[in-house]
């Protein structure tokens, strides 16, 4: 009798272990959506309470709840060269984020400890690079689109090095970053640190009306396996001017186009009709895109 009881207990324990193992296996092998399957990117952590550009913990947590699969963040450095999520220390940004009472020091950039104690818009929590990595581990289906902020290009190297180090050079974790590059020099700098598999060519810094610029962008992307470019929505099409000629070059190239920053469905419809594949937004969500499809 006692042997039979112990045998039953052993079978139950084995079943529990097997069940846990199967569950773990299924959770870890379940295919995630590719980042190219998403239509909308949450801008600067996502809008929250009508405010944009906060890069805050609360905004990013809300973005997950709202169903975003990609969250764009601004990467910056503190005065002591630590990685943080912040757009910039210009007066306009400080006014928008209500940071008028923050002591930024002699160079106008705070150190890490000061940054961690700041409150964005008087109430939101700042995010360090370490916080970002922790957030990604807690939300394994989320992709992060980076927008590197720099006053000189050497800072890009530092930002990428810090990012890779914080991730422990973990291949799976780093594969969930979509790193923006701005020209071939920034591409070389990024790839010298780590061979990020997902890249986006951002044109907002150097884009011009000259069609030769866009021809060169296409060549640069196709020669390096970059499949997506990002651009201002008013460089794609406007109500006044219609679709710009540069879109012919881009559409014929087969590159995917990401338009930013858009918070009106009428503008989304305009750029999508012109060839855009995805958008960056503060307050539009994946579900909103179905409204366009239904029309």
Image: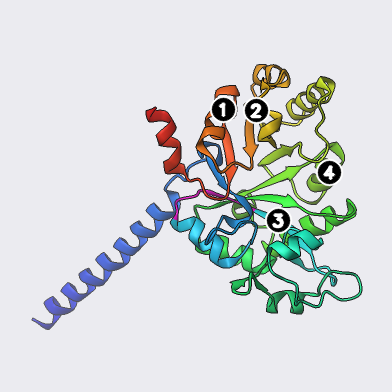
Q: Which residues are magenta?
A: 66-72
Where is residue 258 shown, x and y percent of the image? 63, 35
| Residue holding disc 1 | 270
User: Tag 2's secondary structure?
Assistant: strand
Q: How far is the residue under mark 1 from the one under mark 3?
A: 27 Å
Which mark's residue is nearer the viewer, 3 or 4? 3
Q: Are marks 1 and 4 in contact (CB under 8 Å)?
A: no
Question: Which residue is label 4 attached to?
Answer: 186
Q: Which one is earlier in the sequence, the residue at label 1 or at label 4? A: 4
3D distance between C-alphas at marks 1 and 2: 8 Å
User: What separation in Å lies between label 1 and label 4 (alpha carbons)?
Assistant: 31 Å
Would you place residue 249 above or below residue 90 in this image? Answer: above
Q: Residue furthest bottom?
A: 2
- Kindly identify which residue carries mark 3: 74
The numbered mark, 3 or 4, whose residue comes first in the sequence reads 3
How far apart marks 3 and 4 lie (CA) works out to 16 Å
Query: Magenta stretch containing residue 67, yes or no?
Result: yes
Asked if labels 2 and 1 touch by Cβ distance under 8 angstroms, the answer is yes
Dots 2, 4 in contact, CB < 8 A: no
Give the alpha-carbon distance from disc 3 to disc 2, as whole Å: 27 Å
In the picture of the structure, the residue carrying the numbered disc 2 is 238
Looking at the image, which is closer to me, 269 or 11?
Answer: 269
**Of label 3 and label 2, which has the lower sequence position?**
3
Picture quadrant where residue 280 is located: top right
């Amino acid at each position: 009798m006692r042997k039979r009881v112990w045998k039953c207990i052993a079978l139950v324990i084995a079943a529990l272990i097997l069940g846990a193992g199967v569950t773990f296996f299924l959770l870890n092998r379940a295919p995630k959506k590719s980042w190219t399957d998403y239509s909308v990117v949450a801008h600067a952590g996502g809008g929250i309470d009508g405010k944009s550009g906060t890069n805050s913990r609360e905004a990013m947590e809300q973005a997950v709840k709202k169903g975003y699969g990609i969250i764009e963040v601004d990467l910056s450095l503190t005065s002591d060269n630590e990685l943080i999520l912040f757009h910039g220390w210009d007066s306009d940004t400080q006014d928008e984020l209500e940071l008028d009472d923050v002591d930024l020091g002699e160079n106008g950039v705070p150190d890490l400890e000061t940054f961690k104690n700041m409150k964005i818009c008087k109430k939101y929590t700042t995010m360090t690079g370490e916080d970002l990595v922790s957030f990604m581990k807690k939300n394994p289906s989320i992709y992060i689109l980076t927008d590197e902020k720099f006053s000189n290009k050497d800072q890009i190297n530092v930002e990428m090095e810090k990012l890779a180090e914080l991730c422990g050079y973990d291949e799976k974790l780093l594969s969930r970053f979509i790193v923006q590059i701005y020209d071939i020099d920034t591409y070389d700098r990024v790839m010298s640190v780590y061979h990020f598999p997902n890249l986006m060519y951002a044109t907002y810094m150097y884009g011009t009306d000259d069609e030769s610029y866009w021809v060169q962008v296409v060549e640069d992307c196709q020669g390096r396996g970059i499949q997506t470019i990002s651009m201002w929505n008013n460089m794609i099409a406007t109500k006044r001017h219609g679709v710009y000629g540069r879109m012919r070059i881009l559409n014929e190239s087969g590159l995917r186009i990401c338009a930013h920053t858009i918070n009106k469905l009428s503008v989304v419809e305009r750029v999508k009709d012109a060839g855009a594949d995805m958008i960056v937004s503060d307050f539009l969500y994946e579900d909103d895109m179905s409204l366009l499809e239904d029309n």
